[in-house]
């Protein structure tokens, strides 16, 4: 960076560096939205969903031209219904955690037909999760 006669960094140099820093960060953010922040293969998962190309110059040009940043970034999110379901589940689990989490079940050895408090707790948890079998068993008396 250039310094003026008084030894201070030139304002233009600071603004240039800030622009490069923010632009780089925006492009990394957009790439994470479009491609995912984690490569499943890097953590030993055996699946891959091709997400296409990462955003590039056209994305940055749209931002620079004043396009709505919220709409631009929303368009980068996965469109698969599984992604929407994962987001809904994350919201649900965060709400459960905020409300104190699940009650602990002390007994690991639960048997079919067994009747005790831990089974009632387990059934309530499965019902709250929307477990198909528990929903069916609860029938119309299921509390929302």
Image (cartoon, rainbow, N blue to C red):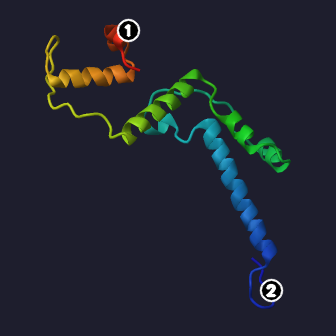
Please determine whether, in this image, residue 9 is positioned above or below residue 59. below
Tell me the residue at 69%/48% (across/down). 27
Please determine whether, in this image, residue 115 is positioned above or below residue 33. above
Q: How many marks?
A: 2
Q: Which residue is mark 1?
A: 140
Q: Which mark is residue 126?
A: none
Ranked by sequence position, the earlier of labels 2 and 1 is 2
Work out whether residue 21 or residue 75 is closer to the camera in this orientation and state it. Answer: 75
Q: Which residue is mark 2?
A: 4
Please determine whether, in this image, residue 95 is positioned above or below residue 3. above
Quarter holding the C terminus is: top left
104 to the left or right of 38: left
- Among the 4 quarters of the image, the one containing residue 15: bottom right
127 to the left or right of 78: left
User: Could you tell me which secondary element the residue under label 2 belongs to?
Assistant: loop
Percent of width and height locating residue 91: 48, 34
Neighbour tally class for label 2: few under 14, some 14-19, many 20 plus, Cα within 10 Å: few
- Among the 4 quarters of the image, the one containing residue 20: bottom right
Quarter holding the N terminus is: bottom right
User: Could you tell me which secondary element the residue under label 1 belongs to?
Assistant: helix
Percent of width and height locating residue 44: 42, 35
Percent of width and height locating residue 97: 37, 39
Work out whether residue 53 or residue 75 is closer to the camera in this orientation and state it. Answer: 75
- Among the 4 quarters of the image, the one containing residue 21: bottom right
Percent of width and height locating residue 85: 52, 25
Alpha carbon separation for disc pair 2 and 1: 78 Å
Neighbour tally class for label 1: few under 14, some 14-19, many 20 plus, Cα within 10 Å: few
Please determine whether, in this image, residue 21 is positioned above or below residue 105. below
């Amino acid at each position: 960076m250039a310094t003026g006669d008084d030894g201070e960094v030139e304002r233009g140099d600071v603004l240039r560096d800030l622009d490069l820093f923010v632009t780089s960060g925006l492009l990394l953010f957009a790439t994470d939205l479009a491609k995912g922040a984690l490569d499943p293969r890097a953590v030993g998962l055996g699946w891959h969903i091709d997400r296409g190309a990462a955003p590039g110059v056209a994305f940055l040009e749209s931002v620079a031209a004043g396009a709505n940043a919220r709409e631009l970034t929303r368009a980068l999110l996965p469109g698969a219904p599984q992604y929407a379901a994962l987001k809904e589940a994350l919201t649900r689990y965060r709400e459960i955690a905020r409300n104190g989490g699940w009650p602990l079940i002390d007994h690991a050895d639960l048997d079919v037909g067994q009747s005790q408090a831990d089974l009632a707790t387990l059934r309530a948890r499965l019902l709250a999760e929307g477990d198909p079998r528990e929903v069916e068993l609860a029938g119309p008396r299921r509390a929302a």
